[in-house]
Image (cartoon, helix red, strand yellow):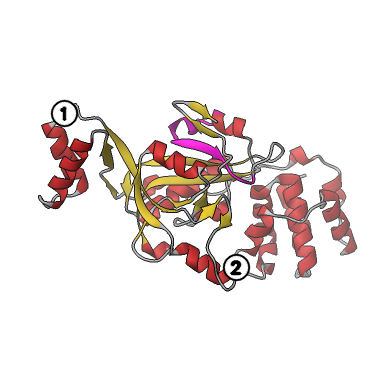
Amino acid sequence: MQNSALIQAISQLGHTDYKDYLRVIAALVSEFGAEIALHILTEAGIVALDKKRGDTERRLRKPLRNITFGTLIHLLRQHNIDTRELTSAKRDDFIPFTPPRRPTQNLTSRSEPIIASFADCSHEERAAIHQYDGGLTRPQAEQRVLAEFPDAAHERCYRVNVSEWAMNKTLLTDGVHDGQKWANFLKTFVHQNLTLSQLIEIVRCGFCFIPCVLAGKKTQENFYGADLICVDVDGTMTVESALQHRLTRNCLFLYTTASHTPESHRFRIVFPMAGFERNAAYYHAALEELICEYDGDRSGTDITKLYFGNNAAHVWTPQQHWIC
């Protein structure tokens, strides 16, 4: 079964009604997975039936249940479309589709120095004096301390926004209605500089974090910079497969999310940026590359997306492996 035959058959459906549109999506996801399904829908012109912005991608992630490729064949036959070429070959004959990628090498990084936390309180206090009394930036103050105390123990910090008004995916804020509750929740985020162990603790408490610094409200236009980059994998890959991926050894940690089950693995991989990345376009391209590498959740391309923790998470780090 070649790409062109299936795409041509589906394109003949024309402007089918919305219910059939949902059945087509579900059948393609069931048979080929979300990436190939999106390619087929786009080439066949079915995406044009999208009733709401982003509706197609939402339906790709959460398709109708109990819909198979046989459902699609039946639907095509109802519209008097020839399906003989589609039923005479195996699924494996379909030519895999690789989505186009936006390589970061075509963009310029605006990476700024990282910041760190000193293990000794006196060194931390010394850095604060240099920063505020000496008018230095935090990285400059750290370098001054290290020049004075070359053996001072220090660890990288990651700049994030954290809300403790969430437990897993449950918001703990009150509101007149859901919209107000969400608005109130967004006001609870506080900027923090966290070490790796502190960040993992935030996750394992079930709290919520935004892995970037915002210059105002939570909008992509207000992206100021980021030390971290996250990719969600929702049922498209097992944890074991992700751990074998060549990039995973470069991550900070991986943790299972609240919706993870043995049958459908759902987890998040958290990576460090080389520095504090200020270029939103570069950051967005790097995020898209990771999503492609792991067949991740495409809704995660929002560079200001927030991520919920999981107080029952299984956590894996390249250094310590599983932390249960």
Instruction: Locate residue 90 relative to residue 34 in the image: left or right.
Output: right
Q: Which of 37 and 236 is in front in this view?
A: 236
Q: Residue at x 65, y 54 (%)?
A: 38
Q: Which of 210 and 124 is in front in this view?
A: 124
Q: Separation of disc 1 and disc 2 at Cα?
A: 55 Å
Q: Can residue 13 be seen in this view?
A: no
Residue located beneath label 2 in the image: 53
Residue located beneath label 1 in the image: 150
Q: What element carries label 1?
A: loop
Q: Is mark 2 on a helix, strand or loop?
A: loop
Q: Position of residue 6 (x, y in %)?
A: 76, 52
Q: Is residue 200 magenta?
A: no
Q: Position of residue 69 (x, y in %)?
A: 81, 49
Query: Label 2 sits on what residue type?
Result: Arg
Q: Which residue is drawn at 28% across and 43% down?
A: 114
Q: Residue at x 58, y 55 (%)?
A: 170
Q: Which of 106 and 319 is in front in this view?
A: 319
Residue farthest along the bottom direction in this orientation: 176
Q: Which mark is residue 60?
A: none
Instruction: Locate residue 198 relative to residue 86 in the image: left or right.
Output: left
What quarter of the picture does the C terminus occupy? top right
Q: Is residue 249 magenta?
A: yes
Residue bounds of the magenta highlight: 244-259
Label 1 packing within 10 angstroms: few (<14), some (14-19), many (20+)? few
Q: Is residue 207 visible?
A: yes
Which mark is nearer the camera, 1 or 2? 1
Query: Label 1 sits on what residue type?
Result: Pro
Q: Do residues under tags 1 and 2 come within 8 Å of each other at their CB atoms?
A: no
Figure check: 131 above or below 155:
below
